[in-house]
Amino acid sequence: MELLTYILITIGIVIIGLYFFNQVRLAREIALKDTTLDTIEEKLKKHKLIGGRHKRTNKKNPPIV
């Protein structure tokens, strides 16, 4: 009976460890996607495709998205 308890506890700890490892991996993936989106948005702003000044009127007139 004691051996079965130790085996179940060990399996539970391994499952919990894998769960936390998976959560950390997912958090890193999401963080990488967020920074990628930020850099893409900065590049678009740099090329005047989002916000910035309108080319013809020289007024601050962001396009409607």
Image: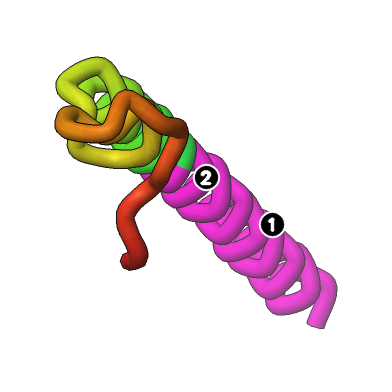
Q: Nearer the viewer, residue 7 or 25?
A: 25
Q: Which residue is mark 1?
A: 13
Tell me the residue at 56%/60% (across/down): 19
Secondary structure mostly taken by the magenta-highlighted segment of the chain = helix
Q: Residue at x 35, y 64 (%)?
A: 64
Q: Secondary structure at mark 2?
A: helix
- Disc 2: which residue: 27
**Circle 1 SS class:** helix
Q: Which residue is pictured at 22% across the width and 21% down the height?
A: 43
Residue 20 image offset from top left, x and y in percent: 62, 51
Q: Alpha carbon of mark 2 to alpha carbon of mark 1: how far?
A: 21 Å
Q: Which numbered disc covers residue 33?
A: none
What span is colored magenta in the figure? 1-30
Quadrant of residue 42 within the rendered picture: top left
Amino acid type, label 1: Ile
The image quarter in which residue 56 lies:
top left
44 sits left or right of 11 in the view: left
